[in-house]
Image (tube, grey):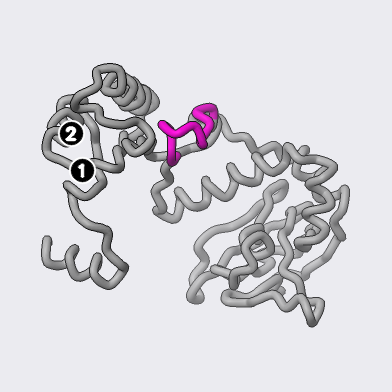
Amino acid sequence: MKSLYDPAVALAFFKSAGNPEKYPQDATIFREGQKSHALLLQRAKMYYVYDGEVSLVARKKIIGSVKKGEVFGELAPLTHAPRTAGAVAQTACRVIALDEREFQGALMKKPAFALMLMSVMIRRLRESGVRLCLDDASAGYASLSWLATLPFHELKIDLAAVGNIAEVPQKLALVQSLIELAHRLKLEAVVAGVADEATAARLKELRCDIMQGAFVGAPLDAAAFVKQHRADQ
């Protein structure tokens, strides 16, 4: 799938509201676990590499590098979460930095950058082993056009929004079409809300990859899930 990221567009976005910063080789740009403090005016920033290269470090190991024309550090200012990795200047480098307020101001001028940044974040999640699913494909809340532009793993269909597929042929045809769409796009088809054996049997005939719902098993909290998973191994 072709990347949505365009370095020239990203540079224009960061230049519109950001501030240039310089770091010598081996300088720490931010630390793993670092938090922002709005009251102390220590806001988390995201960065565009104008020149040089930056290493991303977690648990004292290099987990990736960011080269000229790429962005990094975007998650913390958007979520206010602690840094999941640190950033160190692998070479002497120049960057353009945006904090949360500056990012919001730039986004008002160039809203198309939001989709580009989303594609970067999704790619990094994929590279870390996270599986991504487009939810509520049958409910009208999710645009199927995302499937052509963002690298998902799964397409989820919620039977609560469709109805009884075991007894209504039109509803069965709708779910069948969505499952076939997922497979044509090389995605796994996930169906939620499977409540009985008859529905599960029809979904199996339609080559549904993953089923969720009361028939499969009740929802579990994290501790109960781990315990059940270990018992099933």
Residue 202's image quarter? top left
| 195 horizontally vs 50: left or right | left
Label 2: how many residues lie within 10 Å, few (<14), some (14-19) or many (20+)? some
Question: Which element is circle 2 on?
Answer: helix
| 232 horizontally vs 56: left or right | left
What predominant SS class does the magenta segment belong to? loop
Range covered by the magenta-colored residues: 134-145
Horizontal and vertical percent position of residue 17: 87, 53
Q: Is residue 184 above or below residue 52?
A: above
Which residue is the site of mark 2? 199
Disc 2 versus disc 1: distance between alpha carbons?
7 Å
Q: Is residue 91 above or below residue 82?
A: above
Which residue is the site of mark 1? 195
The one of 14 and 100 positioned closer to us in this rendering? 100
The one of 131 and 31 positioned closer to us in this rendering? 131
Question: Which element is circle 1 on?
Answer: loop
Q: Is residue 94 visible?
A: no
The one of 158 and 33 positioned closer to us in this rendering? 158
